[in-house]
Image: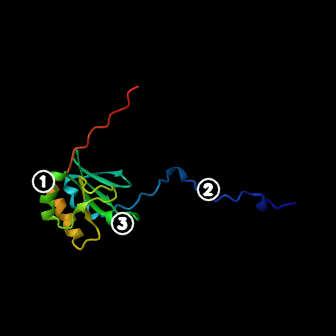
Amino acid sequence: MASRSSRQSKAPPRDENALFHTQRRKPVPHEFVLEALASRSPATRPMFGCLAVYVGRKIVMILRDRPTARNDNGVWLATTVEHHESLRREFPSMRSIQVFRKPITNWQNLPSDSPDFEESALRACELILAGDPRIGKIPARKRSARR
């Protein structure tokens, strides 16, 4: 006859506080950017597997640090093509996002592997705090499905 211990389930011990456990959040990429924007109370939301940053109603940037397509890691600035040239004078390493496979995109990347990354990201935060109209877009409202 098998002993009582061998008949017991091999399941791991049950945690009495299991109802209160939550899924661990991913670390915030380039968290210093959020600290620099703290006076404007930025909000964040997941987007494209990254972290979108909003100031007021505007999306101003996306923070990305992923193991795939590493050349697009960094700070993505929400802007428009008409502002690329003037922003590139402030951020010489800025370029279009490559993961979208378009030669030019409205999203512009301050790549995390550039030597001036932190300086550029902090300068972008200064521009956002100053209300620079070249950075940030009010997202279009999502339409609910009509039945």
Residue 132 marker? 1
Which of the pair 14/25 is nearer the observer?
25
Q: Give me the C-alpha separation between circle 2 and circle 3.
A: 40 Å
Q: Is residue 87 left or right of residue 71?
A: left
Residue 70 marker? 3
Circle 1 packing at 10 Å, graded few (<14), some (14-19), many (20+), is few
Q: Is residue 2 left or right of residue 100?
A: right
Q: Which residue is mark 2?
A: 14
Residue 83 is situated, as x and y percent measured from the top left of the image, at 14, 54
Circle 3 packing at 10 Å, graded few (<14), some (14-19), many (20+), is some
Location of residue 104 (image quadrant): bottom left
Asked whether the beta carbons under mark 2 and mark 3 sit within 8 Å of each other, the answer is: no
Residue at x 72% of width, y 57% of height: 9
Residue at x 19% of width, y 69% of height: 119
Q: Is residue 49 above or below residue 71?
A: above
Residue 60 marker? none
What amino acid type is highlighted by mark number 1? Asp
Residue 55 is situated, as x and y percent measured from the top left of the image, at 22, 50
